[in-house]
Amino acid sequence: MRTRPAKLDGLQIEVLASRKSEKWHSYPPDVLPAWVAEMDFPLAEPIQRVLQRAVDHWDLGYPVEPRDTGLCEAFAQRMSDRFDWRIDPRRVEIITEVVQGLYIALEAYSRRGEGVVVQTPIYPPFLSAVADTDRQLVENRLVSGPQGWEIDFDALHSAVDDATRVLTLCNPHNPCGRVYTRPELERLAEFALANDLVVVSDEIHCDLVYEQHGHIPFATLSPQVEAQTVTLNSASKSFNIAGLRCAVAHFGSADLQRRFTDRFPRHIRGGMGILGLYASIAAWRESQAWLDAVAQHLEANRNAVVDTLARRMPAIHCHEPEGTYLAWLDCSRLELPTSPAAHFLEHGRVALSDGRHFGNGWEKYVRLNFATSSEILEQVLQRMTDALNR
Ligand SMILES: Cc1ncc(COP(=O)(O)O)c(C=O)c1O
C-alpha cells in the first residue's frame, strides 16, 4: 500500500488540545505545551493501519507471548540495518517501558545502598529509579565546554568507589541532546570495564540524530563491553506511541539476562499489550519513510530554536542539540525572580520542563520540546520572547 508523506506543518491547535495524553492535557487551554517528550505529528500510516485493523477485526486478545511475537526479531533486524549491530533475538526481552527496564536493572545488578552512576542533568526517572530502589546516587555532572556538553572523566574517576555497581548512560542524551562520539564512548567503556560496572544504556532516542552525528550503540564497542551492557530501547519515542507501553531490553550476556528475568519474571513485569506489539513492529519494519520526514522537519525546528534564541533571547544559552527533539536552555543570565519555567508559564503561557527535576543545581534551566509544527514552535518562541520583554 502506498504511504502518503506525513503532514508535519499546519497542525490544528484545537485538534491537538483534544488529546487526553499528558502533553496537551496538563495545563489550562491558553497554555502552549512544550514540555513532556511527546510529538504533535500525525501517526505514521503503517502504524495507523495495524491499529485500525486490530480494532476492525476485534483483535484485542492476549498477545502470543511467551511464544514468538516477532518483536524481538524486528528489533534485531532494525539494529542490524541501522547500526550494523548484529544481535541474537533470544537475548532480547520485552518489557512494558524503558523506565521499567531501568528500575529492574538497578534491582538486578546492585543491592540496597550500592552506587549507581547517573550523569546529570538527566531525564528525571533516572534519579527516581536510584532513590526508589534505595541505591546510592553517584552523580557526575556533565560540563559545558566550547564544543557542547561533555562527560567530566576526572570527576567520574573520583566519584566511584568499591560499592559502585552500575553506570547508567542516556545516549542520545535527554535533556542535553548530546550524541556521544566513539572516542567518548570508548573512554566510558574503558572506565566501566576497569571498575567492573554493569552499563545500562538507554538508547530510546537513537533514531533522532541530526546531520553529521551518528548513533553508536554502546554494546557495539567490543565483545567485552557488550557482555557488560544492557541496552534499553523502544519504538515509543521515535514513532510517538508512548501510550502503547511496549519496549525491549537487550542483554549482552546470558548471565545479565538471567539475573534480570529471574528476579522479575514476565508476570511481575506485566505483559505488553497487543496494540503496542503490532504498532512497534509496524514502526520498526514499515515506518522509516515517516521517520525520515520527521527527522528532517525536527532538524529545521532545531535550527529555528537555536537561531531564534540567538536573535531574540541572546541571554539564554543553548548548545545546539545533536539529537533528540529537546533543547536544554541555560536561563541563569536572565536573573529572573522565579524559576525560568514558572516565569515562562506565568508571563508567556508556555509550559516548559523545569530544570530542577533533572538533578540538583539545574534550577536555572528549562527543557524545550520542539517536536511540533513550525507555526506552533514559532508561537512558543514568540511567547517566550514576550515573557522576557515585559
Ligand atoms: C531517555 C528516555 N528514556 C525513557 C523514556 C520513557 O520511555 P518509556 O515510556 O518507554 O518508559 C523517555 C521519555 O521521554 C526518555 O526520554
Image (tube, helix red, strand yellow):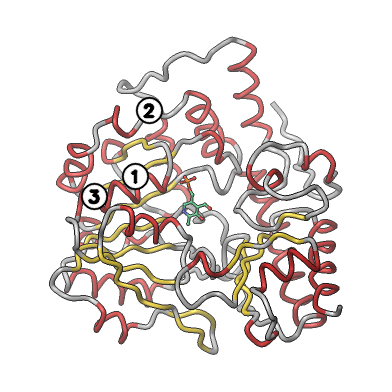
Q: What residue type is labelled 3?
A: Glu
Q: Indicate left or right for 35 with 308 as reference.
A: left
Quickly name the residue at label 1. 249
Question: From the viewer's perspective, is the residue at label 3 or at label 2 nearer?
Answer: 3
As drawn, 339 above or below 59: below
Of residues 47 and 312, the one nearer the viewer is 312
* Element on which disc 2 rests: loop
Q: Residues within 10 Å of mark 2 (few under 14, many from 20)?
A: some
Residue under the point 37% across and 64% down: 169
Q: x, y percentage for residue 32?
A: 77, 55
As drawn, 114 above or below 292: below
Q: What residue type is labelled 2?
A: Gly
Question: From the viewer's perspective, is the residue at label 1 or at label 3 nearer?
Answer: 3
Q: Which of marks 1 and 3 is nearer the N terminus?
A: 3
Q: Measure the alpha-carbon separation of dots 1 and 2.
A: 14 Å
Q: Determine which quarter of the picture holds residue 128.
A: bottom left
Quickly name the residue at label 2. 271
Q: What residue type is labelled 1?
A: Ala
Residue under the point 60% across and 74% down: 365
Q: Confirm if mark 1 falls within 8 A of ligand 1.
A: no
Of residues 377 and 194, the one nearer the viewer is 377
Q: Which of marks 3 and 2 is nearer the N terminus?
A: 3
Of residues 22 and 88, the one nearer the viewer is 22
* Quadrant of the image containing the C terminus: bottom right
Residue under the point 65% across and 44% down: 289
* Element on which disc 3 rests: helix
Question: From the viewer's perspective, is the residue at label 1 or at label 2 nearer?
Answer: 2
Q: Indicate left or right for 33 with 275 as reference.
A: right
* Quadrant of the image containing the N terminus: top right
Q: How crowded is mark 3: few (under 14 residues within 10 Å), some or many (20 or more)?
A: many
Quickly name the residue at label 3. 107
